[in-house]
């Protein structure tokens, strides 16, 4: 239980966490930067940022598909 409390109290801000999660979506992280982030990231922020990022990705794909279908390009 103490490890969880310690992890949640990590110093990285939510904005920095969003940036780290966004880079991980693209898969372009250097090993040293990844290790440094892992020591500082708040796991709660990572989960929230990951869910938001995944939702935005899916909504973007849905909007793109609807636009292609509506424009008649797919016909």
Image (cartoon, rainbow, N blue to C red):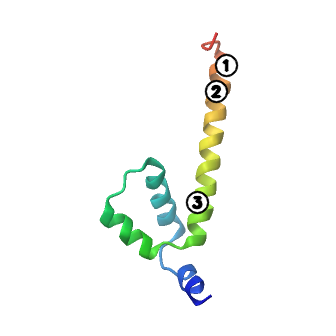
Q: Quadrant of residue 62?
A: top right
In the picture, the disc for residue 49 is: 3
What is the residue that sits farthest to the bottom in this orientation?
2
| Alpha carbons under labels 2 and 1: distance apart | 6 Å
**Are the residues tagged 2 and 1 within 8 Å (C-beta)?**
yes
Q: Earlier in the sequence, mark 2 or mark 3?
A: 3
Residue occupied by mark 2: 65
Q: Secondary structure at mark 2?
A: helix
Tell me the crowding category of disc 2: few under 14, some 14 to 19, or many 20 or more residues within 10 angstroms, Cα based.
Answer: few
Q: Earlier in the sequence, mark 3 or mark 1?
A: 3
Measured as percent of width and height from the top left, residue 48 is found at 62, 63
Residue occupied by mark 1: 69
**Tally of marks:** 3
Compared with residue 11, is residue 52 higher up or lower down, i.e. above or below?
above
Residue drawn where x is 57% and y is 79% of the image: 8
In the picture, the disc for residue 32 is: none
Measured as percent of width and height from the top left, residue 4 is found at 59, 82
Compared with residue 14, is residue 53 higher up or lower down, i.e. above or below?
above
């Amino acid at each position: 239980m103490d490890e969880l409390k310690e992890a949640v109290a990590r110093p990285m801000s939510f904005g920095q966490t969003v940036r780290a999660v966004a880079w991980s979506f693209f898969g372009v992280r250097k090993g040293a930067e990844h290790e440094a982030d892992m020591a500082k990231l708040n796991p709660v922020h990572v989960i929230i940022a990951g869910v938001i990022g995944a939702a935005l990705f899916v909504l973007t794909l849905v909007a793109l598909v609807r636009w292609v279908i509506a424009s008649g390009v797919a016909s």
